[in-house]
Image: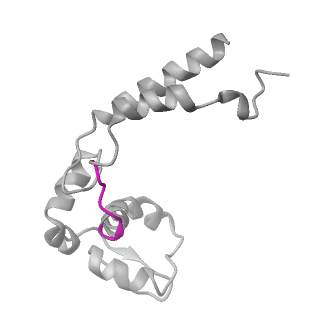
C-alpha cells in the first residue's frame, strides 16, 4: 500500500515538473543551443561546418548538403569522421523538429491530469517485482 502511495506521489511530481517546461514556437525544446538554431533555421542549415566525409569521396560542409548525401550514401567510418559527425547532430535535430507535430498545450491541464491519474491509475495492474 505504501509503495502505491509513493509511486502516486512520484507521478504527480513528474507531471508537475513537466508543466514547468516552456513551449516555444509550438515545440518543446529544452536545449538552448537547439532553440537558437531552430529560431534561425534557414541560416542554421546553411552554416559552414567542418567537412564530413562519405564513402564515395563526397564531402559536406553544411546541413543542406548533409541531408542530400546522408540519404543516399554511408558515412566514412574514419576516426576523423567520428570526431566531426557530432557537429551534424544539430542538423538531424532540426530535421526532426521541422517534421514533428506542434505541441498542443491546451489539451492537458497538468494539475487535473495528475489528480485524475492519482484517482484512476491502479498500479496493481502492472507487473512488478515488488509483489509476489
The foreground one among 10 and 4 is 4
Quadrant in which the C terminus appears: top right
From the viewer's perspective, is residue 132 above or below residue 37?
A: above
Is residue 129 shown to the viewer in this render? yes
In the figure, is residue 7 to the left or right of 108?
Answer: right
Quarter of image, res 25 = bottom left
Is residue 14 shown to the viewer in this render? no
Does the magenta-highlighted stretch encompass residue 68?
no
Q: Residue at x 54, y 71 (%)?
A: 77
Percent from the top left, x then y, of residue 31?
Answer: 28, 46
Percent from the top left, x then y, of residue 110?
Answer: 35, 34
Q: Residue at x 25, y 68 (%)?
A: 49
Per the rendered image, the range of residues in magenta is: 98-105
Please name the predominant secondary structure of the magenta segment in the image.
Answer: loop
Quarter of image, res 100 = bottom left
From the viewer's perspective, is residue 115 above or below residue 31?
A: above
In the figure, is residue 48 to the left or right of 102?
Answer: left
Percent from the top left, x then y, of residue 87?
Answer: 33, 61
Q: Residue at x 30, y 82 (%)?
A: 65
Quadrant in which the N terminus appears: top right
The foreground one among 43 and 14 is 14
From the viewer's perspective, is residue 41 above or below residue 37?
A: below
In the figure, is residue 131 to the left or right of 99?
Answer: right
The foreground one among 57 and 69 is 69
Amino acid at each position: 500500500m505504501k509503495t502505491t502511495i509513493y509511486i502516486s506521489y512520484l507521478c504527480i511530481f513528474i507531471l508537475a515538473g513537466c508543466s514547468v517546461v516552456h513551449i516555444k514556437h509550438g515545440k518543446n525544446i529544452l536545449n538552448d543551443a537547439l532553440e537558437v538554431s531552430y529560431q534561425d533555421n534557414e541560416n542554421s542549415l546553411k552554416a559552414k561546418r567542418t567537412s564530413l566525409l562519405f564513402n564515395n569521396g563526397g564531402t559536406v560542409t553544411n546541413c543542406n548538403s548533409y541531408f542530400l548525401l546522408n540519404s543516399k550514401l554511408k558515412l566514412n567510418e574514419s576516426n576523423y569522421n567520428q570526431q566531426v559527425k557530432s557537429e551534424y547532430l544539430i542538423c538531424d535535430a532540426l530535421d526532426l523538429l521541422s517534421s514533428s507535430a506542434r505541441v498542443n498545450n491546451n489539451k492537458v491541464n497538468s494539475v487535473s491530469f495528475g489528480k485524475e491519474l492519482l484517482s484512476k491509475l491502479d498500479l496493481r495492474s502492472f507487473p512488478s517485482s515488488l509483489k509476489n
